[in-house]
Image: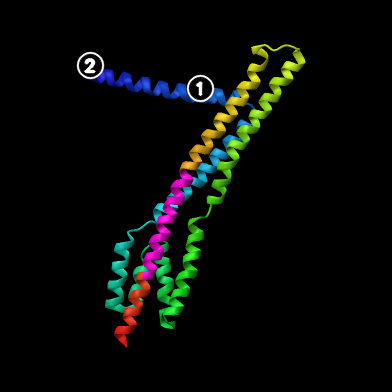
Amino acid sequence: MKFFANVMQAQDAVADGGGTINLLVNYFNQGGEFMWPVLIILIVGLAIAFERVIQLILADVNTRKFIVKVKEALEAGGTSAAEEVCAATRGPVSAVFQAGLMRSSEGIEAVEKAVVAYGSIEMSFLERGLVWLSLFIALAPMFGFLGTVIGMVAAFDAIEAAGDISPSLVARGIKIALLTTVFGLIVAIILQFFYNYAVSKIDRIVVEMEEASIELIDSLVMKESDSS
């Protein structure tokens, strides 16, 4: 009996989910032509957001563990061994480390310049696509508000044409106004969540990259002092 009760609950949940989707589709169809730009913004924005989130997850490594490996390789096998560790590790931290190690023969000053230059390049790669995401966050409610204005204009046109203020005349225009505003704000909220997650992830990776770069330079300075 308990099994059949669980099955019935699952069926009810599926039915409720389908009803919710049908309700959203119905509201979308009633929202007018300005619902389409909002939908396009949502689809493209989510595509960019998912791509950024995946790339940031792949770029995030255990920085402390990686630094320990590089230091051990630097002490045991020199710069070439440390470069091999960097080449075998993904992420911006390893790329910056490898750029600095490749210039280690030219002195600490050259290493610092390489670290700064490649750090800026890696940061630009991490932030790629976020400008479009922020643009879509701004555009979604704007299209919603534009639909609101158009809906209110249509409502007043109906009142003017009929010469009468009745609920049936203005209901459609006001409904379009409210629906476009609601959907525009919902899209902006969804994209804002992904944008904030990406920015916080990038900030943390950049901080780790800066701290790791300082440790790399310190290790190279100590290696030079020991060799001299």
Q: Is residue 33 visible?
A: no
Q: Is residue 194 left or right of residue 11?
A: right
Which residue appears at 56% of the width and 24% of the height? 27
Task: Kindly state the secondary structure of the residue where label 2 is placed.
Answer: loop
In the rendered image, the residue lying farthest to the front is 165
Image vertical order of residue 179 relative to residue 48, above or below: above
Residue 203 colored magenta? yes
Q: Is residue 150 left or right of residue 45?
A: right
Give the x, y percent position of residue 200: 43, 51
Q: How many marks?
A: 2
Magenta stretch bounds: 194-214
Residue 23, disc:
1
The quadrant the N terminus occupies is top left
Q: Is residue 167 left or right of residue 161?
A: left
Which residue appears at 34% of the width and 73% of the height? 82
Looking at the rendered structure, the kind of residue marked 1 is: Leu
Give the x, y percent position of residue 122: 47, 62
Q: Nearer the viewer, mark 2 or mark 1?
A: 1
Residue under label 2: 1
The quadrant the C terminus occupies is bottom left
Give the x, y percent position of residue 202: 44, 55
Give whichever of 55, 104 is nearer the camera.
Answer: 104
Image vertical order of residue 121 relative to residue 13, above or below: below
Who comes first in sequence, dot 2 or dot 1? 2
Which residue appears at 59% of the width and 29% of the height? 180
At label 1, counting other C-alpha atoms closer than 10 Å, the crowd grade (few under 14, some 14-19, many 20 or more) is few
Image vertical order of residue 192 relative to residue 216, above or below: above
Task: Kindly state the secondary structure of the residue where label 1 is placed.
Answer: helix
